[in-house]
Image (cartoon, rainbow, N blue to C red):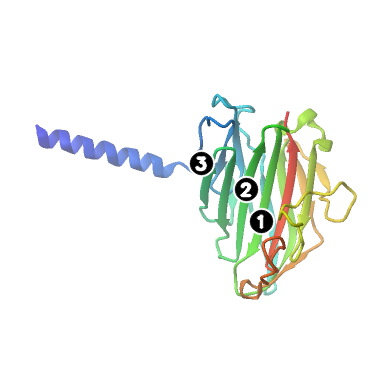
Amino acid sequence: MKSRVAGFVVALLFLTASLTAQQPLSREGSQSSGQSFAISEQGTLLELFDANGKSRFDKISADGFAVSYEVRGKTMAVSAIGTKSNGLQVGKLEMNGLSATATVMTKENRLEVTSNFLLDKNRQELIIERRIRNVSLDSLSLKTVRSYIASVLVSGGDSGSIRAGIYGPGSDCGGSGECTPPPCPARGCLPLIRGESNFILEWKEGIKLAAAAQRSHAGATRLQENEVLIVIHVFLK
């Protein structure tokens, strides 16, 4: 009888572990310090919770990014929107109260994309930072960079509630190391396209990223020569 019970317990533990391993998403519940996130392992926002652990906007399916780049004469494209992704590996998650971070590599191990989400409770502002870094031994050119912001998040559904900027290699983000998107039409301001369920922020001017071994060491406040940073501020509903 004991052996049968032991066998049942082992089987139950195996089943639980299998189900857990199959979950592609990570969710952090109610935090004593306030709201929290659910994000995918590829770095897309899936849900935003209030201090009581309740979803503010239900499931979010239109947040994400898309990048196309050229290396050795070949154009590659990767993307992650909602729970769907293309050309990306399984990423790593870090959850910490009002912030969440996902770091993911492209399948050919050339680009690393780190998506960081931060909630400013006082201003009811969501800050999204996506750092795209060339980790390969070849220099490459980013052809197109897109960020998708779910319109359900945006205060009044108005593009004026979004401010976004892109910062190329060597950009100086000031003494604090924090980049603040400029008001349009300043250079670096990402143009907005209104989609069916999101706002699309697009940059198509091309940015050359140095090989990983050629990155500079200018300090924490200046971007390296092999990386680019997209910063998005969204005033929430």
Sequence-wise, which precedes: disc 1 or disc 2?
A: 2
Kind of residue sitting beneath label 1: Arg
How packed mark 2 is, by other alpha carbons closer than 10 Å (few <14, some 14-19, many 20 or more), is: many
- The residue labelled by disc 1 is 131
Looking at this view, name the residue that lies furthest to the front.
175
Q: Position of residue 130 (x, y in %)?
A: 67, 52
Q: Position of residue 119 (x, y in %)?
A: 65, 38
Contact (Cβ within 8 Å) of mark 2 with mark 3: no
Quadrant of the frame with the N terminus:
top left
Which labelled disc corresponds to residue 154? none
Q: Position of residue 147 (x, y in %)?
A: 72, 48
Kind of residue sitting beneath label 2: Asn
Q: Position of residue 84 (x, y in %)?
A: 58, 45
Sequence-wise, which precedes: disc 3 or disc 1?
A: 3
- The residue labelled by disc 2 is 116
Contact (Cβ within 8 Å) of mark 1 with mark 2: yes
- The residue labelled by disc 3 is 25
**Residue at position x 63%, y 43% in the image:** 117
Q: CA distance from mark 2 to mark 3?
A: 15 Å
Q: Is residue 162 left or right of residue 132?
A: right
Quadrant of the frame with the C terminus:
top right
